[in-house]
Amino acid sequence: MQADSMKTSTDFANRLLAALPAQDQVRVLAHCDCVELRRGEVLGTPGERIRQVYFPTDSFVSVVTAPADHPGLEVWLTGSEGMIGAPLVLGIELTLLTTLVQGTGPAWRMSTEALLQALHQSDALQRTLERYVAVLLNQAARMVACNRFHALEGRLARWLAMSQDRAHSNRFHVTHEMLAAMLGVRRAGVTRAAMALQGAQLIEYRRGDVTILDNAGLRAAACGCYAAMKAIDAQSLA
């Protein structure tokens, strides 16, 4: 579905696009299609040329590094606060990490050529996306420390709370296998941590369907990186 050139910030839910002046919103949306991202879809693998960028709305995407001896480890989680294809802002046209859709939902899709042209034409877009790249670097550094130093139960609560924020829903789907890969732990560890959160009546977990029962309780159980990540996200729009 082609974006209507008359749309305004109230017609879409990506915060980067919504922060732009009206004329820049029109310029960007005129070259966007609204697409449905599907859970499990791979949007890019390392070494591929970036042909399209995505501005998620109700979908969310994991950006994953995959060492040779490990299936993968999540570096950051991107939803309506960000974009997929950020290396282009730095003049890098190759995908650096694997991008994997975690939550099904819509996103605005734009060709690389159209984005580069828009960046050339719009100082506001250039500044907004440069700030976002700085936020991603900060998030990645925080995620490394989180995975190294924090207990698994707190990390799982943090991941679930971040996913809920990006899904804009108390219910979403994720398997123990996927959680284990994203958090860099064994499946059995995820199972124990999920059972602890369920025993505390913070979540309900059945066959991959997660329901958040207690929003405030889940965030209280999360490691301090959840609040830190929220603060980092806000910097992209400061």
Image (cartoon, rainbow, N blue to C red):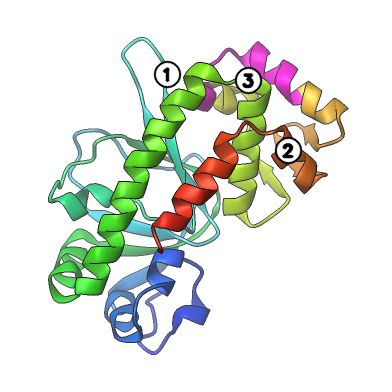
Question: Which residue position is annotated with label 1?
Answer: 71
Q: Residues within 10 Å of mark 3 (few under 14, many from 20)?
A: many
**Where on the picture, by quarter, is residue 138?**
top left
Q: Which sits in the foreground, 4 or 179?
A: 179
The label number, if any, that marks residue 220 in the structure image? 2
Q: Earlier in the sequence, mark 2 or mark 1?
A: 1
Q: Quadrant of the C terminus?
A: bottom left
Helix, strand or loop for the magenta stretch, by majority: helix
Q: Quadrant of the N terminus?
A: bottom left
**Is disc 1 placed on a helix, strand or loop?**
loop
- 197 shown above or below 90: above
Q: Which sits in the foreground, 127 or 59?
A: 127
User: Does residue 76 show up magenta in the picture?
Assistant: no
Q: CA distance from mark 2 to mark 3?
A: 14 Å
Q: Which residue is at a point 87% across and 26% down the rendered structure image?
A: 199
Q: Residues within 10 Å of mark 1 (few under 14, many from 20)?
A: some
Question: Which residue position is annotated with label 3?
Answer: 152
